[in-house]
Amino acid sequence: MDARLRRVNKEIADCKNDKTSNIKIDLIDESPFHLKGSFPGPEGTPYQGGHFEVDIVIPESYPFQPVKMKFITKVYHPNISSASGAICLDILKDAWSPVLTLKSTLISLQSLLCSPEPNDPQDAEVAKHYTTSKNSFEETAAYWTHIYAGGPGRSSSAPLKGDGQDEIAIAGLDPAHVSGFEALGFPKGKVIDVLRRLNYRGANAAKITEDRVVQELLK
Amino acid sequence: MSSDYEYSDDENYFDDGDDMDTQEDAETFDEDEDDVMGVDFKTDDKGKRKAYELDYSSFSQSDVEDLMKKDIEYICGIFGVDSGFAALLLRHMAWNKERLVEKYMDNPDKLLVAAGVAAPETPIVPPNRLKSPTASQAGNTRRPTRTGSKLLGFGSKSSGASKSPTISPTISPTSSFSVQPKSPTSSEPFTCPICCDDVPSLKPVALDCGHAYCSNCWTDYISAKVNEEGDLIVRCMGEGCALIAPDSFVHSMLIPDPTAPIGDAEKEEANGNTWKRFQELLVRHFVSSNRDLKYCPYPGCTNTVSCPSAASKLSLTSVVPTVSCGARGIGGQMTQSQQAQGNLGLAGKEHKFCFGCPIDSDHRPVVCGVAKMWLKKCRDDSETANWIKSNTKECSNCQSTIEKNGGCNHMTCKKCKHEFCWVCMGPWSEHGTAWYSCNRYDEKGGIDARDSQSKSRASLERYLHYYNRWANHEQSAKLSLDLYAKTEKKMEDMQITSALTWIEVQFMKKAVEEVDKCRMTLKWTYAMAYYLASGNQKDLFEDNQRDLEKAVEDLSELLEQQIEPEMIPTLRQKVTDKTVYVQKRNEIVLDDTATGFIEGRWKWNVSVDGFDDPENTD
Ligand SMILES: [Zn+2]
Ligand SMILES: [Zn+2]
Ligand SMILES: [Zn+2]
Ligand SMILES: [Zn+2]
Ligand SMILES: [Zn+2]
Ligand SMILES: [Zn+2]
């Protein structure tokens, strides 16, 4: 049998038999080389209670080349692209070793949720949010966990609207800031966009003059 | 004034002028010496080296391998290590032998670990030096591997062999692993932790660290590294293990023992190619570590050029190090233009490239720094300039669309018969006479511009003047190759229908090659002229440029004529004479420019790295 297929089949079987970890690997279609991994968000983090799914593509030369993984579930995290789910993690690139497995890699992703590396960001805006105002970041991350990963949500976060999604909370912004600039006559969407880009959050908001924001809004 | 040349075409006597400091020419042209085509174009190359030439030599891959071997043997001799380790150490230090010896004397253990020769936790390390690099620091990992990924080494439970205490991580300088891959001795059945295979015949193979995998996995791993990543550093597959496989180990995994072939011809061939590629990577690494050497940039070519006189940055302000690796034509896959040349029956172009910069063609006469500046400007302004490159224009007289189909700039409108210059769209009557003045930009218009808007328009116009001519020569060179293909076909037909010999129809080839070469020179003279500070020197430069351009356009036009069998002897004489003249003009441009660089005669209108800043720009 093809060595890659033998290896992947064994990995999938091992993962099924392992009752101690809560990592799951499922087939997406008939191909054993395109899979879906999933795991619960780690306890004691803003991701707690969420269920995170990862798209897995096994390359031709696996395991000598790293497996390709990206989040299907939207995650608010400095090392994960908030738009595409792309992941910045050393073992998925040059630190890959053929002795690593799908399961061990998924566990690494889980632990990446515990310990962000804002100095080596995938998503620069999220990383800025993380480094300048950690509390606000965690609120946003928890909100994302709630609306995208089925997490419980926090009682302290903004009251939910009818559709359950609040674009201000998704952007990690203070509703008071947004309505302040909206009152100047700018459309809400644009305000959110600019404030998010400028990282107008927490203590950092005090460092950005109103003029600067208006300047950006006028562009 | 005396001329050593004889021309049948009387309007093109070579005019030295008084202002050009040409040396007494040692060259002679023996027109009637022989009928053999090579001799037709003979110029006497013996004698002094020209100012635009420089010494260089070219090496084949095995020549370079010999150089590497010498360095390796030198290190073996000093350290008493085997050649596999010596090679890894040299590679780690970018082949700097002196630094290597220094570092080794300073702290051998640290060096051995960093070079991937020895595993880190060596018992030799005294307690006060316990801060030796960890595996992940020694490796190229961007950040320490997360604890999470360490949790589960695949199948780590099943193989006790990888942690066998009998394998010492220290190395003895004459250890044999680099010659023979190690097979950890173990009586328990071996399951490869990577492919999960456990057939009884499976043999574990490991580097000195003892991380054992089956040889198939090693081979696949090495192939992926070498072929997909172009990486010659084959680290042990063990997670965080920093040992690097010596070349002999790589060899033994790719090229099977002749007594035990793998019996799969396809795989053997693939592995053989991987080994070839690995050897090429080794040579490339050596070459890129050495300032005196440069690898030939032509696809599929494995030659190297050595040019110590152009190795320093400073030297690049006085020489343009155009070199050739010695090979011609194409190895590997062809580009379209290479294919066209192949079809042309040209033996294939020389592998000419610049030793001093990444430009993979001859950019004489202009120095690397200025050439680079010009290319950047062209890239930045490509939007504005794009329309010029287009192959169609409107006749300035009747506005009908005219398509350029040859390299010649003398255009005749099919509709109204208006004759004009493709480059400046001016009437050809002003060009075709002895005074060819399409090359010089009239700065006066720019000086008159007062307000900033017309100033910026003037500066764009000025740029377009040079860019236009630059792009045109490139385009013309391509078109004349196409034209030549057609002509050659026609002449071959004539061989059949007339009494002409093969030799007698070959003169076109040499002429096309010469035109091609000179258009290259002309192209770059416009980049040079764009940045030359105006003044006497620039005027002289543009005089030479104009003379070459006129000569090239004349020859180019001749090549586009309709060919009738009865006029071939005359045509041949004319083309041959013009070719020699063009060649001469090209040498004058190259020689005068090169001499100027050596003498520091050229001044720029912008600041150029390595040159004095312009005195004043307004
Ligand atoms: Zn294996
Ligand atoms: Zn190892
Ligand atoms: Zn070459
Ligand atoms: Zn150059
Ligand atoms: Zn016309
Ligand atoms: Zn013209």
Image (tube, coloured by chain):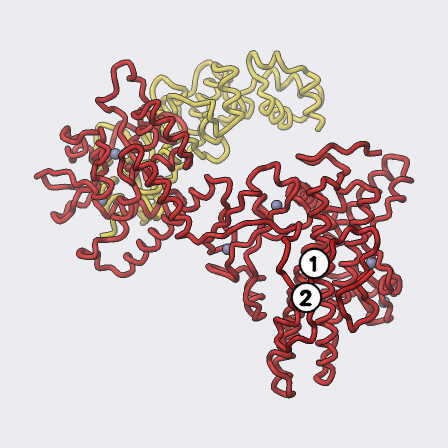
Chain colours: A yellow, B red
Q: Does the residue at mark 1 contact the one at mark 2 (Cβ under 8 Å)?
A: yes
Where residue B475 sits, quadrant-wise, is bottom right
Q: Between marks 1 and 2, how big is the CA–CA gap?
A: 10 Å
Name the foreground residue: B532 vs A197. Answer: B532
* Quarter in which the N terminus of chain B is drawn: bottom right
- Residue that appears at 62% across and 51% down: B53
In the rendered image, which residue does mark 1 sit on?
B519
Report which residue position mark 2 lands on: B480
B434 or A64, which lies in front? B434
Q: In the structure shown, which secondary structural element does the residue marked by tag 1 occupy?
A: helix
Which part of the image, by quadrant, shows the C terminus of chain B? top right
Q: In what quadrant does ligand 2 lie?
A: top left
Q: Is B524 displayed left or right of A147 in the figure?
A: right
**Image height check: is B19 above or below A185?**
below
Give the image location of residue B505, x and y in percent: 64, 78
What residue sits 74% from the left and 50% below the top?
A: B526
Work out which residue is located at the far left of the displayed protein and give it.
B187
Question: Can the viewer see residue B606 in this picture?
Answer: yes
- The answer to whether any part of residue B471 appears in the image is no
User: Callout 2: residue from which chain?
Assistant: B
| Amino acid carrying mark 2 in the image | Ser
Question: Does B317 sit left or right of B266 as displayed?
Answer: right
Q: Are marks 1 and 2 on the same chain?
A: yes
Disc 1: which chain?
A: B
Q: Quadrant of residue B480?
A: bottom right
